[in-house]
Amino acid sequence: MESFELPKNFLMGSATSATQIEGGDQNNSWYRWCQSPGHIHDGSDCSRGADHWNRYPEDIQIMKELHHDVYRMGLEWSRIEPESGRYDETAIRHYRDEITLLLRNNIKPLVTLHHFSNPLWLEDRGGWENPDTVASFVRFTRYVLNELGDLVSEWITINEPNVFLIYGYARGAWPPGKTNLLSMFKALRNLTLAHIQCYREIHRIRAERRFSGPTMVGLAHHLRIFDPEDDKFLNKIPAKLIQYLSQDLFLESMGFGRYGFPLGLGGYPLGRGKYYDFLGINYYSRDMVRLAFEPANMFGSLTVKKAAPVNDLGWEIYPEGLYRLCRKYFAKYQAPIYITENGVCDEGDTMRSRFIYDHLQQIARLNREGIPVERYYHWSLIDNFEWTEGESGRFGLVANDFETQQRTLRKSGEFYGEICEKKIVTREMIKKYFTVAT
Ligand code: IFM
């Protein structure tokens, strides 16, 4: 292992989402989903979470100790707007207090407006398949910007639109539990319209109200590598198709407003534009693709590369993938790159330090080659509610005992904190954190 340096102005921190860490809210689509037996593998429920709603001062203190420059957090829409058109001032004041405390500790917030969960009133009206949801989300965004826009200049409208729609509308594994590709594409059109309108509104409100700081708005895209299982031409086709339908179609429509097939025939119904100020990438893994006659799976079956290292959930650990994706998408999207998520499910903490080392090394390499990867938000600060894996999927730099809500810094968290502080990995750090340094 070698020492390496990150750019001096590189910003580092961690990422979380409201539904996964806050606890306490039962007015959202995920809480309801958790109530049906079998939906969550360990039977847990998101209304416990890591009790961050009450413990955020303690968690911000931990971020401070880990030398965070930045923190990506989410807002729970159902708390802020518990009924259609009725806003809860206590909830928004709570977020103001939390953000104020971050700023007092010199930690810059990047705030996500939608991260997989919907208020129940919206879900009951048909969720993202209902075209009225676009206006509801834009109205919510306006309210939030007017209340928090003076404190927050950086926004993510929607987290991982592809994962949200594929799991919720095509695979039926997440709320609303549908298995209908037509529903999925209908919802994608609405998500696209919502993103583009919110992108404009966030810029408009912050400019009109003369809020300080450059306004930065984007999406957090879940990007994976899809490699054909071998060199056979027949496996290359589904690999390309899956990449297009589950990834590039989303980037194109939400990023430029272009409705590629099957959303449309390549037109720009809302006008051709550039609806992002940074390219947000959530990166975890790679899939190998083999041709399969399964139209619902886009004619491919996904496997893990033979003998590859995997995390607790069986996802391949493939740091080179981050390098490949950043190079490829920067060439097309030409914007500063923020790694808005990257992390590993590793309860025993046997892989996380190496995972961090390997991925940051790829980022250092990208920067040396002129690709502007400006930020890194590790997923996640603390163990939280990992959707269908429940409380058993452990992604935290900090371990959490969900019974007592006791936080314990993992060794990898200590390593990460030292990199955040110094923006360098030295020989000494390698000796300190890795038992076998080669
Ligand atoms: O926990 C999730 C997060 O909500 C979205 N991106 C992937 C993470 C790990 O699965």
Image (cartoon, rainbow, N blue to C red):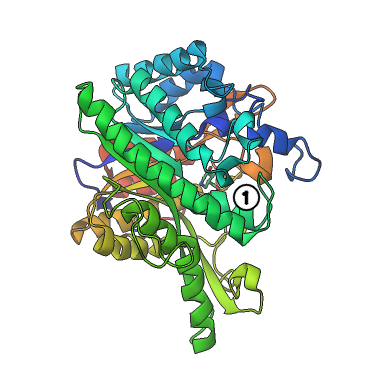
Label 1 crowd (10 A; few <14 / some 14-19 / many >=20)? many
Q: Secondary structure at mark 1?
A: helix
Q: Amino acid at mark 1?
A: Gly
**Residue under circle 1?**
168
Q: Position of residue 50 (x, y in %)?
A: 59, 27
Q: Taking 135 as reference, is 325 above or below it?
A: below
Q: Nearer the viewer, residue 426 or 273?
A: 273
Q: Is residue 44 visible?
A: no
Q: Quadrant of the C terminus?
A: bottom left
Left or right of 161 in this view: 157: left
Rendered residue at 52%/43% (across/down): 131
Q: Is mark 1 within 8 Å of ligand 1?
A: no
Q: Nearer the viewer, residue 302 or 192?
A: 192
Rendered residue at 77%/38% (across/down): 43
Asked where in the image residue 389 lies, by quadrant, the reply is top right
Q: Position of residue 143 (x, y in %)?
A: 40, 22
Q: Quadrant of the N terminus?
A: bottom left
Left or right of 120 in this view: 110: left
Q: Is residue 285 visible?
A: yes
Q: Position of residue 318 (x, y in %)?
A: 46, 63
Rendered residue at 37%/66% (across/down): 266
